[in-house]
Amino acid sequence: MLDYAALSALAAVVREGSFERAAQSLFVTPSAVSQRIRSLEERVGCTLVVRGQPCRPTDTGRRLCQHVDRVRLLEQELQGALPALAPEGLTRVALPVAVNADSLDTWFAPAVAAFAAAAPVLVELSVDDQDHTATWLRNGAVLAAVTGTARPPAGFNSRPLGAMRYRATASPAYMSSHFADGVGAESLARAPSLAFNAKDDLQARWVRRLCHRDVELPRHTLPSAHAFVTAALAGMGWGLQPEVLVAPHLAQGSLVELVPGTALDVPLYWQHARAASSLMDGLTQGVVAASARALRPL
């Protein structure tokens, strides 16, 4: 049997980022937290927490934290069915989820907000590129994710959500300055582009499809979908933008497509832990319904 007091201490350290704050959240001393985690590490035979500022879980530590999250969901389910187990009412349970920034800034935030307003949960959202959120699932950092991969990790289910359409846009002044002679490999290699972070390859993917080869793109990094639009309007660079965010600007002429008719559709999937829980079912229903209204069918 696993020591759930020790597992709770591990989850608290990972959640709070330090042994001291974890101890405060558990109403015990830091030494008690340290002893519980040390005992657990001896039991599993490996390090579970990398001490630092903040403390970080190892891969095994993440998996154990994920196990704790699943158990808490199941306990919440049991308390709902047997109210005598929770005489003071249901306690809110942590629900860690990963999502890509473009979904969060368009259709996902209203869905998760409506769910969390009615459910006894504390949603913990992590943001990453849609091609990398599945890694959060495999590492045990989250219980559900919006991801760009169809095949789920072991222990998870996958549901298609739809495709988010992107358009390569820039301001008219930027187009005149950088693409006066047309959009091609040579001009794209000189014109500053916009990227969410180092993992973002949407621009490179679009260029590869247009030019039939890879092109080294100079780029600014802006980890915000709305900042992307602001930067494009200001003439900072060109980038792939969610159609829903740039449609008004395209209609007004404040943004234009680099090459009309070259929209890029990115498939999205909802992957979640198989633990039977009405909370996870409720979140899934909200996410699927919201995506059906906002995304294109696959």
Image (spheres, grey):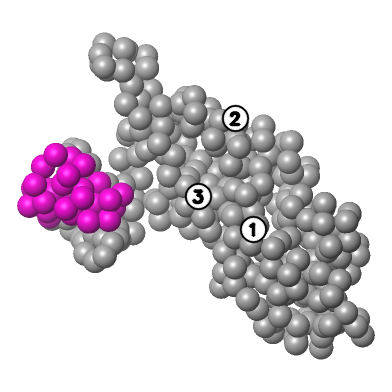
Q: Count how many numbered circles sit on residues in the image.
A: 3
Residue 213: image tag: none
- Is 70 included in the stretch rendered in magenta? no
Q: Are marks 2 and 3 in contact (CB under 8 Å)?
A: no
- Is 31 included in the stretch rendered in magenta? yes
The kind of residue on which mark 3 rests is Ala
Residue at the disc numbered 3: 98
The dominant secondary structure in magenta is helix
- Say whether disc 2 or disc 3 marks the residue closer to the N-terminus: 3
The kind of residue on which mark 1 rests is Ala
- Cα distance in 3D space between marks 1 and 2: 25 Å
Q: Is residue 38 visible?
A: yes
Q: Residue at x 74, y 52 (%)?
A: 245
Q: Quadrant of the N terminus?
A: top left
Describe the element under mark 3 as helix, strand or loop.
strand
The kind of residue on which mark 2 rests is Gln
Q: Which residues are magenta?
A: 12-39
In this rendering, the answer to whether 188 lies above or below 72 is below
Residue at the disc numbered 1: 225
Q: Residue at x 69, y 68 (%)?
A: 231
Left or right of residue 263, residue 156 in this image: left
Using the rendered view, name the quadrant where residue 3 is placed. Answer: top left
Left or right of residue 278, residue 182 in this image: right
Looking at the image, which is closer to me, 2 or 190?
190
Residue at the disc numbered 2: 285
